[in-house]
Image (tube, rainbow, N blue to C red):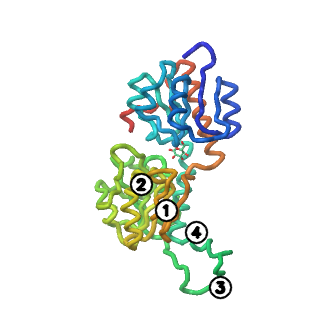
Amino acid sequence: MPKRKPLVIVTRKLPDVVETRMRELFDTRLNLNDHPLSQAELINAVQTADVLVPTVTDRIDKTVLSRSGPQLKLIANFGTGVDNIDVETANARGIIVTNTPGVLTEDTADMTMALILAVARRLTEGAAVIGSDQPWTGWSPTWMLGHRIYGKRLGIVGMGRIGSAVARRAKAFGLQIHYHNRRPVNARLEEELEATYWESLDQMLARMDVISVNCPHTPGTYHLLNARRLRLMKPTAIIVNTSRGEVIDENALARMLEAGELGGAGLDVFEHEPAVNPRLIKCARAVLLPHMGSATLEGRVDMGEKVIINIKTFVDGHTPPDRVLPNMI
Ligand code: 8YV
């Protein structure tokens, strides 16, 4: 790192308090109008910055990294998922990558529960009735019936921090907790959650009423929920995804929802963001949100603080606390 203040380029607008602190500490270049950077702008950034602070909307792939200048030493991602960054290539070029784990766990778990409830209890369909062209004609015993979640089985795909936080909430709602993970979680946590481990994802999928996707998107989880696996689910089951769109084969899911072969879907993330599959938009039983899982002011400030700590630690000559290594992906 240079003796002068490092040049930190931030690709998107961050909360004011974060930007102010960054300006105090570093020579910071901000994106005040918050436009998503083009590939040419990203290349320009990696050619000039000592530290790049990207987000999920920036693809820091081989093409971009192959143009990085020797001064770029750190990519401090504003976000936990690092599937937007080719970490292996970055490391091979001597660039360290960090992320912001932990601080968006609770917000993302809240959003997962919100989607489970929204799909099961038809929240968006009901809310749309009020004030619509066809006004509400009054209560009826058989109208707008959803499904009870209490007592149902929830299968969590990926029992990391967020998966466990979802499990804690879901348990309080009376759901039975099941999970699939590369390996079982520690016995204490399993006991606390009264959770059942399924080594076989296929077997778990076939028995659940609700599936929540909480694993990261990696080469190994791309289309983990493909057409074959989705077909294993009960026709009444609902699926919720607050992780990454790429984990589910979105076309296969849309096909099944259209055919009434699934109970519903709650999606906060999509395969080709910001594009949303038009077939999903038409599905009455799909509740779709524009990637809002961690969208709280508190969460975004905490993420910013993590980014600052990672940069500061690195600039001071130490290993940043949230370094991501290729073998962690
Ligand atoms: C963030 C997320 O908003 O941190 C993550 O992995 O998915 C989001 O909640 C986004 O990634 C910020 O870059």
How far apart are the alpha carbons under marks 2 and 4? Answer: 35 Å
Residue 261: x %, y % from top left: 37, 71
Residue position marked by numbered label 1 in the rendering: 266
Q: Given the image, on which type of amino acid does mark 3 rest?
A: Gly
Disc 1 + disc 4, Cβ < 8 Å? no
The quadrant where residue 54 appears: top right
What residue is pinned by disc 4? 124
CA separation in Å, label 1 and label 2: 28 Å
Q: Which residue is mark 3?
A: 138
- Name which residue lies at 51% across and 56% down: 268
| Image x and y of residue 187, in percent | 38, 49
* Helix, strand or loop under label 2: helix
Check disc 1: other Cα within 10 Å, few if <14, some if 14-19, many if 20+: many
Cα distance in 3D space between marks 1 and 4? 11 Å
- Of residues 287 and 322, the one nearer the viewer is 287
Furthest residue in direction front, as rendered: 40
Which residue is identified by label 2?
Answer: 191
Graded by Cα atoms within 10 Å as few (under 14), some (14 to 19) or many (20 or more), the crowding at tag 2 reads few
Residue in the picture at 51% in, 19% down: 71
Q: Quadrant of the C terminus?
A: top left
Front tag of 3 and 2: 3
Q: Which mark's residue is nearer the viewer, 1 or 2?
A: 1
Lower sequence index among marks 2 and 4: 4
The residue located at (41%, 66%) in the rendering is 153
Could you say whether the residue bearing mark 3 is in a helix, strand or loop? loop
Is residue 116 or residue 285 the one in the foreground? 285
Give the amino acid at mark 4: Thr
Q: Please state which of residues 147 and 84 is positioned toward the viewer in this rendering.
A: 84
Task: Please count the marks in the image.
Answer: 4
- Residue 160 horizontal/vertical position (percent): 44, 47
Q: Earlier in the sequence, mark 3 or mark 2?
A: 3
